[in-house]
Amino acid sequence: MASRRVAYAVRGDAGRANAARRALLADLVSRAPSHVDVRLNTSSHTDEFIAMRLGLVPFVASDDDASPVVVRVTGRPVLGRDLRGALHPDAPVLPLGDGQAVDATLHFAIGTGHDHARFGRAVAVGMRPVGEDEEPTLHSISFETLQGGDDHAACWTEALDALDARLRRARAHLLSSDAAVAS
């Protein structure tokens, strides 16, 4: 399996690199389970336990598909492949024995890491200076994505675009505040 960890170099002081790091953590749009409706549960697990287990499953990051996922399993463990869009098809989700059944619907919400950690697409985000300088001008930002593959580049681009938009809003606010003070 290809590594899901990647690093990018950011030229500038630590504040600039940290802003990019924080954008990776807080500004990437993703979907995550928001609540679970359990219609049938003949297992020994409580409905709350089933909802918790289903809510822990990471799903393919999608900023436009919040359609519900239905899971209906009888007499065998619930696996990732039983949940449309689950990232890990072979991951065991919920043990079920012979004759036990679960029928539930997962509902999703769209959000960012700023809203809640469950929406985070970039994880294990780190920052370190590169070189021996007293005041380094190059920093390495490293992170992993749950999806791997091309999602690294998409995450990096989306984070930098969000950071750019935030800086433009801050500049516009400052300019409008300066104009109000000057008059």
Image (cartoon, rainbow, N blue to C red):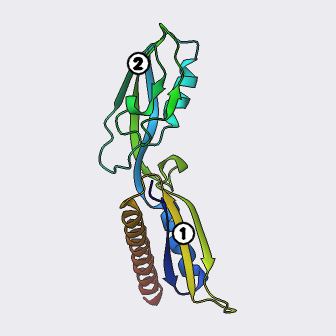
Give the class, few, some or many, for how many residues have Cα within 10 Å of label 1's Cα (few <14, many ≥20).
some
Location of residue 103 with respect to 25 vertically, above or below: above
Quarter of the figure that contains the C terminus: bottom left
Q: What element carries label 1?
A: strand
Q: Name the residue under label 2.
A: 73
Which mark, residue 56?
A: none
Q: Indicate the position of residue 130 as horizontal and vertical percent values.
A: 60, 84
Q: Residue 16, relative to residue 23: is it above or below?
A: below
Compare residues 156 and 34 and report the one nearer the observer: 156
Disc 1 residue type (three-letter): Ser
Q: In the rendered image of this protein, does residue 95 appear above or below residue 115?
A: above
Q: Nearer the viewer, residue 153 or 16?
A: 153
Residue beneath disc 1: 142
How many residues crowd around disc 2 within 10 Å: few (fewer than 14), some, or many (20 or more)? some
State the image quarter where residue 141 is shown: bottom right
Q: Toward the viewer: 100 or 63?
A: 100
Q: How far apart are marks 2 and 1 (CA)?
A: 39 Å
Q: Where is residue 98 in the image (x, y as percent from the top left)?
A: 49, 9
